Image: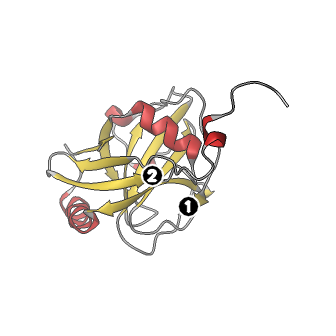
Amino acid sequence: MSSATPHPISQHPTARPVERFVTVSLDRRGVSCTARLLTEKAPLTCAAVWEALPLSGDVYHAKYARNEIYALLSPFADREPPLENPTVTPIPGDLCYFTFSETQLNTGSYGYESAADHRGRPTVVDLALFYERNNLLINGDQGWVPGIVWGAVVDGLDRMADACQDLWRSGARGETLSFARA
């Protein structure tokens, strides 16, 4: 056996990881919810997001997945996380992480304006919140689009869902989706 210092977790086998929380906000609407990071299921993704917070971008309402809002961001991790804790059927309150190449979002069917044009960037990160049931991550251009579930809303989903419905009906122009440490 090595006389090296043991890993901190091995010193305390019954110790639970510290729980971390984020606030997810629709800034102009003044609505937010709180989510717990799923560090035990998506440790690399949670670490990448946590270290990059705060993050914010123009909000979009999904056309294909149904009950999803998201922001497209420049990559912020040293290395993109692997597909840990994947899903194609997110449930209400799931926070998901997606990585897309420039060609995957390069069709006019997505409706991105020039300000959100991500051509020329090799990678785009999509941080999403699913606010209601019956979501299916299948896209007419891409097929199945698995996402990494990295967080779960623990407070305020009802208020956020109402604001997301308003965003769907009234439009997203001028609204931002923000993620910050709680």
Using the image, determine if residue 3 lies above or below residue 161: above
Q: Quadrant of the N terminus?
A: top right
- Helix, strand or loop at disc 1? loop
- Helix, strand or loop at disc 2? helix
Give coordinates of residue 102: x percent, y percent.
54, 35
Give coordinates of residue 89: x percent, y percent.
53, 68
5 to the left or right of 85:
right
- Other residues around mark 1 within 10 Å, as few (<14) / some (14–19) / many (≥20): few
Residue placed furthest toward the right = 1
Please identify the quarter of the rendering in which residue 27 is found.
Answer: top left
Q: Residue at x 54, y 43 (%)?
A: 45
Q: Residue at x 25, y 63 (%)?
A: 156
Using the image, determine if residue 124 lies above or below residue 149: above
Q: Nearer the viewer, residue 160 or 141?
A: 160
Q: Residue at x 55, y 54 (%)?
A: 147
The reply to whether discs 1 and 2 touch (Cβ–Cβ < 8 Å) is yes
Q: Nearer the viewer, residue 105 or 155?
A: 155
Which residue corresponds to mark 1? 140
Which residue corresponds to mark 2? 109
Cα distance between the residues tagged 1 and 2: 10 Å
169 to the left or right of 37:
left
Please identify the quarter of the rendering in which residue 134 is found.
Answer: bottom left
Q: Residue at x 46, y 62 (%)?
A: 64
Q: Nearer the viewer, residue 120 or 79?
A: 79
- Other residues around mark 2 within 10 Å, as few (<14) / some (14–19) / many (≥20): few
Using the image, determine if residue 163 lies above or below residue 24: below
